[in-house]
Image: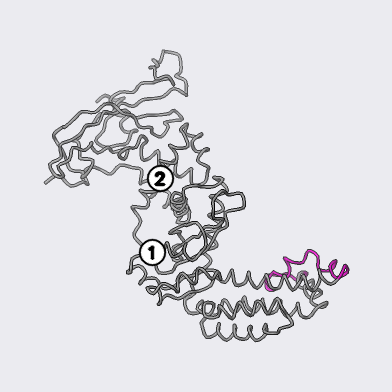
């Protein structure tokens, strides 16, 4: 092996393989011969023709195979650009006679998986770009089709998923997501099932009915259902019915997300504000206009000027002031340290909202009373319910960037990769990129 071939082999970076020849091709596939004094154009393709130095290995079991069953034709794999120049790897693989598994499989290639026409390291880099860019933009960057980027992304995510340990499902989050009025699906909502301990989505299905959740529950084994401790959901009754109607989940607790409890309380105080100001005449409407956001804001988050404005509003109607005080008290109750304190605080709020003449707060009273057990369960288990809404934000980011998805399985895998976020720190980037590097053949076991 000459000096030039040795240097190219080192840059190539795969042990047991040698760069035998390098030549250039134009877009029509014709060879381009460099002339002295002239530079080769940057859009010209560089082809690395490689050969194997070590004995071939079975692509099925990894055993060393010294006999050849069939010589196949030359194939090409797209690799990462070298100094901005497009690169492809050319090699003619063989089919081996494997004594261990008895198959006539293709030999194991260090740079690519079976049925792929791009190297693993190239797929890993495209997937990293697809993490924050639309597929079409990634395809334009690397000069490939968007379908190539998607197949590379699916293969890279599969390698990442294979390295992750299986996590026991204990805390389950249930939430629905509105697809928008312009979608063409029969259902306008999807149900997202997530693991609250890791914040990752598990399953996505169309609809938000009881049958939708039951369809996912039927996929779980009795052992998996026995390991579930609680379900965290909003105050949507079909979700609650789907869990309660499953005898195998009778032991599981149901908790309501504090975000949706406060949201329902905010709807009540907003309705009361409309009655006080917007339905009381022109002068009162002028006073209460543009104050919805301030009435929904927590007292501790208001500055001095905002608190003065709130006190002025409440001076016109004491009923609105009491309602604001109740909602602010509810915020603190939902963060009580234990179930006993939460039970005491919520019972006091129910006594303050049971008056019949205050219709919006009475509706809030009935809602809190009907979901009393699910709300006070927060004080016993303290599930990380904020991850459900964080998952919704990641959903919005993905869907807006791609302008929608048709394949829900692809969406949930991409959303899981985005949520787990293996590229948040430098160590995560190195570990993810390392999935595209070859496994050293010496670590594989020899055939018996």
Q: Looking at the image, which is closer to me, 343 or 407?
A: 407
First in residue order: circle 1 vs circle 2: 2
Q: Secondary structure at mark 1?
A: loop
Residue 309 sits above or below residue 53 on the image? below
Residue 208 is tagged as none
Vertical placement of residue 399 versus 343, above or below: above
Report the residue at 33% width, 66% height from top: 221
Would you say 24 lies left or right of 441 here? right
Q: Main secondary structure of the magenta part?
A: helix
Looking at the image, which residue is at 36% across and 66% down?
A: 168
Please say whether residue 48 is one of the residues in the magenta stretch: no
Q: Which residue is mark 1?
A: 218
User: Dot 2 corresponds to which residue?
Assistant: 154
State the count of labels. Answer: 2
What percent of the width, then of the height, locates residue 38?
45, 15
Q: Give the quarter of the figure containing the N terminus.
A: top left
Q: Quadrant of residue 214?
A: bottom left
Marks 1 & 2, CB-CB < 8 Å contact = no
- Residue shown at 78%/63% (left/top)? 290
Q: Nearer the viewer, mark 1 or mark 2?
A: 1
Q: Secondary structure at mark 2?
A: helix
Q: Is residue 289 magenta?
A: yes
Q: Residue at x 54, y 47 (%)?
A: 404
Q: Is residue 366 left or right of residue 280?
A: left
Q: Answer left or right for 416 relative to 3.
A: right
Q: Position of residue 119 (x, y in %)?
A: 36, 37
Find the magenta span and give its range.
281-305
């Amino acid at each position: 092996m000459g000096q030039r071939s040795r240097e190219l082999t080192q840059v190539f970076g795969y042990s047991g393989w040698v760069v035998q020849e390098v030549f250039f091709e134009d877009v029509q596939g014709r060879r381009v011969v460099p002339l002295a004094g002239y530079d080769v154009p940057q859009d010209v393709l560089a082809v690395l023709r490689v050969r194997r130095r070590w004995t071939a290995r079975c692509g099925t079991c990894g055993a060393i195979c010294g006999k050849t069953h069939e010589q196949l034709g030359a194939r090409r794999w797209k690799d990462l650009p070298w100094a901005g120049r497009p690169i492809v790897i050319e090699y003619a693989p063989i089919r081996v006679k494997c004594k261990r598994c008895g198959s006539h499989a293709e030999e194991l290639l260090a740079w690519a998986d079976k049925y792929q026409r791009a190297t693993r390291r190239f797929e890993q880099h495209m997937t990293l770009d697809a993490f924050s860019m639309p597929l079409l933009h990634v395809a334009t960057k690397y000069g490939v089709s968007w379908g190539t980027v998607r197949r590379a992304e699916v293969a890279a995510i599969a390698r990442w998923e294979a390295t992750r340990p299986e996590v026991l499902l204990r805390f389950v989050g249930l939430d629905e997501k509105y697809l928008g009025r312009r979608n063409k699906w029969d259902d306008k909502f999807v149900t997202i099932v997530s693991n609250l301990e890791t914040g990752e989505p598990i399953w996505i299905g169309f609809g938000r009915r009881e049958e939708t959740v039951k369809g996912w529950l039927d996929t779980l084994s009795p052992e998996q259902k026995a390991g579930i401790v609680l379900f965290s959901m909003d105050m949507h009754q079909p979700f609650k019915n789907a869990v309660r109607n499953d005898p195998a989940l009778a032991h599981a607790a149901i908790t309501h997300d504090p975000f949706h409890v406060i949201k329902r309380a905010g709807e009540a105080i907003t309705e009361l504000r409309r009655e006080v100001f917007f339905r009381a005449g022109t002068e009162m409407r002028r006073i209460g206009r543009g104050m919805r956001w301030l009435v929904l804001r927590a007292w501790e988050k208001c500055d001095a000027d905002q608190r003065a404005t709130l006190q002025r509003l409440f001076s016109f109607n004491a009923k609105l002031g009491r309602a604001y005080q109740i909602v602010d008290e509810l915020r603190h109750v939902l963060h009580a340290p234990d179930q006993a304190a939460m039970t005491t605080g919520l019972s006091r709020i129910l006594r303050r909202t049971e008056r019949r003449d205050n219709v919006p707060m009475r509706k809030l009273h009935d809602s809190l009373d009907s979901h009393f057990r699910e709300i006070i369960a927060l004080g016993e288990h303290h599930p990380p319910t904020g991850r459900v809404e964080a998952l919704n934000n990641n959903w919005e980011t993905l869907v807006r960037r791609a302008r929608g998805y048709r394949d829900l399985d692809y969406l949930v895998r991409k959303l899981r990769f985005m949520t787990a976020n293996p590229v948040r720190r430098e160590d995560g980037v190195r570990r993810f990129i390392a999935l595209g590097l070859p496994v050293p053949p010496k670590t594989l076991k020899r055939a018996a």
